[in-house]
Image (cartoon, helix red, strand yellow):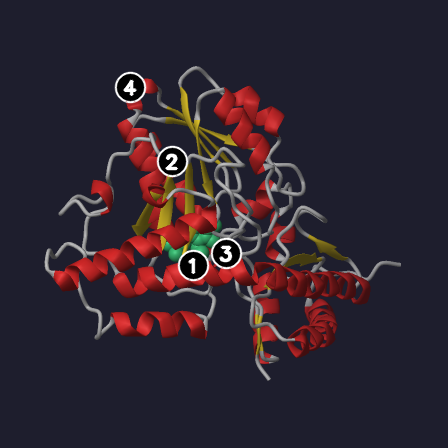
Amino acid sequence: MITYFDYHSSKPVDQRVIDAMQPYFREHYGNPSSLHMIGDRATRVLEQSRLSVAEFLGAEKDEIIFTSGATESNNLALIGYAMRNRSKGDHIILSEIEHISIHNIAKYLEKQGFSVSRIPVDQYGQVSVKKLAARIQDKTILVSINYANNEIGTLQSIAEIGMLCRERNIVFHSDAVAAQGLVPLDVRRDNIDLMTISSNDMYGPKGTGALFVRSGVKLQPIIIGGGQERGLRSGTENMPGIVGMAKAAEIARQDMAGDVKRLTAYRDTLIKEILQRIPRAYLNGHPVMRLPNNAHFRFDGIEGEALLLSLKDAGHAVSTGSACSSKTLEPSHTLIALGLLHEEAHGSLQLTCGRFTREEEIAKIINDLPEVVQRLRKLSPLYKEED
Ligand code: PMP
């Protein structure tokens, strides 16, 4: 039996989504930019899909721009806003535990002459709203804070941050990819101006995403062409992808309560059993303010890669951190930001569950993990049994 605990990096597409997408490959192949009846039909479907995604976020239909995924949405949000609004100021604030795409976009903007402040987080990965407020300057135009962290699952005080930004007249962007489908999102309640979501993170197809752009917020496009998506994202719309994303959003709204209940039970069992069965094991991230599907541990004397490979041999697909950064040998910037030492960060294990996780998978990892950790510790020159 193979288990899968890497839902943060990839999710299978829900069969209901595949069924909804199917006709848009051959049967309904129209281009929304065509003026004939086949194009008209595509336009109606595009706008219906936009409405479904808007309703998922508590937004208006015309505030949704379809993109190729969360990376592009983050680029459009940050580069698009910064470049268009440079005359208002050139200072941007983010947290130290943003997704690598946000960090790399921020570095790019620094090269373009913007200044960027990176707010430290506490030991659980939460941004202090007070610290954030203290970094705001007259020239601050944009704050970007993730809704929930994609590695450790810590939820941020988004409503408070939104309120602060609104009071100070600063545009607030949030990357909600890790949280979507697990936390009810509402851009109006939380005073969010720009929000990134992706299709695959709610069991839709990869290669499709969206950016919520509050009415009145002006962006400069980063992809120039035929003027689709209100001129903000040119290129023929990926209709099967968009229809799939919309269906995924509708299902996420219907199924969220049930998904969250089941996932919370799995998460709590994983945390309780693993901390109980393995000595010198610790939970990374917040004990309460965390995503319902995320359990993230570190084990003294263990090297994460060796743990991952041993678990792979035992039939478990797990992760040591973000798949987006797995090609670097650097420890996770998120774990370092929590104040962990390099060896602690390297000894971490991320288990994320999802809609299709089964109870047998939870039982199997709980059963196998203690033995694997014990075996690796015996081989480790770093690990000494305590007296
Ligand atoms: N933001 C977050 C929080 C993510 O976890 C990811 C990766 N799933 C991205 C952005 C980038 O998404 P994509 O690779 O689909 O562009």
Please tell me in which quadrant of the rendered image residue 269 appears. Answer: bottom right
* Alpha carbon distance from label 4 to label 3: 36 Å
Question: Which callout, 2 or 3, points at the residue further toward the start of the chain?
Answer: 2
- Towards the viewer: 91 or 113: 91
Residue appearing at x 67%, y 40% in the figure: 123
Q: Nearer the viewer, mark 2 or mark 3?
A: 2
Q: Is residue 78 left or right of residue 145?
A: left
From the Cβ of disc 2, is ligand 1 less than 8 Å away?
no
Vertical position of residue 282 compared to residue 157: above or below: below
Q: Amino acid at mark 3?
A: Ser
Q: Which numbered marker is on residue 214?
A: 2
Mark 4: few/some/many CA within 10 Å (<14, 14-19, 20+): few
Q: Which numbered marker is on residue 87?
A: 4
Residue appearing at x 61%, y 59% in the figure: 257
From the Cβ of disc 3, is ligand 1 less than 8 Å away?
yes
Q: Amino acid at mark 2?
A: Arg
Residue marked by disc 1: 327
Q: Is residue 38 left or right of residue 287?
A: left
Q: Secondary structure at mark 3?
A: loop
Q: Is residue 134 left or right of residue 216?
A: right
* Alpha carbon distance from label 3 to label 1: 10 Å
Q: Nearer the viewer, mark 3 or mark 1?
A: 3
Vertical position of residue 317 compared to residue 92: above or below: below
Mark 3: few/some/many CA within 10 Å (<14, 14-19, 20+): some
